[in-house]
Image: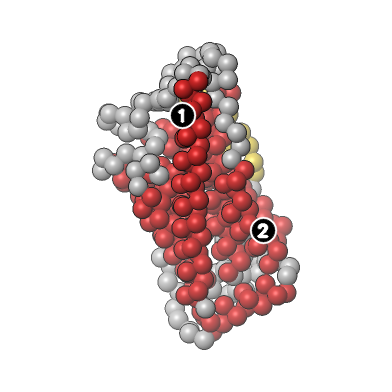
Amino acid sequence: MEKLVAVVLLMVGFCVVGHSQNIDTLTKTGLTSAGSAKADTIREVSLTTGWGSPADSIPRKIDWSKAGTFKPAFPAKSFLLPAALIAYGAVAVHNNSLKTVNAHLKDAIWEDNPHKPFHLDNYLMFAPTVSVYALNAMGIHGQNNFRDRTMILLMANVFANGTVFSLKGWAHEQRPDGSNYASFPSGHTAEAFAGAEFMRMEYKDVSPWYGIAGYAMATATGMLRMYNDKHWMSDVIAGAGVGIASTRIAYWLYPKMQHWFGKGKNPDVVNFVMPTYSNGALGLSYVKTF
């Protein structure tokens, strides 16, 4: 049974990578044809990177003085899969049939095969994110420079953590090991899949295998949460959905925030407000970068 779940989660990763590659291709095709009709509407973006190294992404600049410089449509189709994953987990909180599926899997993983917890999941959940910075440090550059990708990552984590802790309060679901009532959804899994999608987005134009590797690490994290008796299968599935959706929202929202708070100003200076989440409290932070 546990092997089946691993295959299902990996299939989710492959579907995400494959489906997203198709959406990205269609989007680029649309932008190219639009650009040929209005060459001044969209310009390539860009900021220099720190650490005294050359830019680690294609230089980009947005001309805020031109009307309609950046008006990306909300990519609703790309959120169908993560929304379905979250919905499944939410329904399972109160659905007896899905609770039975959770219980059978717990018995197969834990009770039928007693074992000691293996806490690699506490570190593996950060592996996709760390890999992005490691690859850039080795000269394999992704989509964004250091500053842009770091801001996007921070936004994704704010969205993911805010959603996870809000849902934990709503569900009040007991963990399989009975330790507390913060089982749904899995925060470790959300962090891991947010990082996996971050890795996919940064390297989708280099090779799809980077995204596949990121999703494999995220899947292993989710499996370990069940192996360690910390989460039900539905918690892990929902956590995956939260992580993917959070990163996709961050990638869609970040350029818009640059536009909203940078329009009419020096394009080399970026000013914007970013949401924050800390100890259960939501807030806003004002960011000014030069």
Please name the residue shown 66% across and 77% down the image: 100
Q: In the picture provided, is 177 more to the left or to the right than 142?
A: right
* Location of residue 187 in the rendering, given as x and y in whole percent from the top left corner: 55, 57
Q: Can residue 181 be seen in this view?
A: yes
Q: Which mark is residue 32?
A: 1
- Camera sees residue 288: no
Q: In which quarter of the image is residue 232?
A: bottom right
Residue 19 location (% of width, % of height): 50, 51
Horizontal relation, residue 270 to residue 170: left or right: left
Q: Which of marks 2 and 1 is nearer the N terminus?
A: 1
Which amino acid, by three-letter code, is at mark 2? Ala
How far from the left and from the top, in percent, is residue 217?
A: 41, 60
Q: Residue at x 48, y 85 (%)?
A: 113
Return the residue at label 2.
Answer: 87
Of residues 40 and 48, which is closer to you in this image?
A: 40
Mark whose residue sits in front, 2 or 1: 1
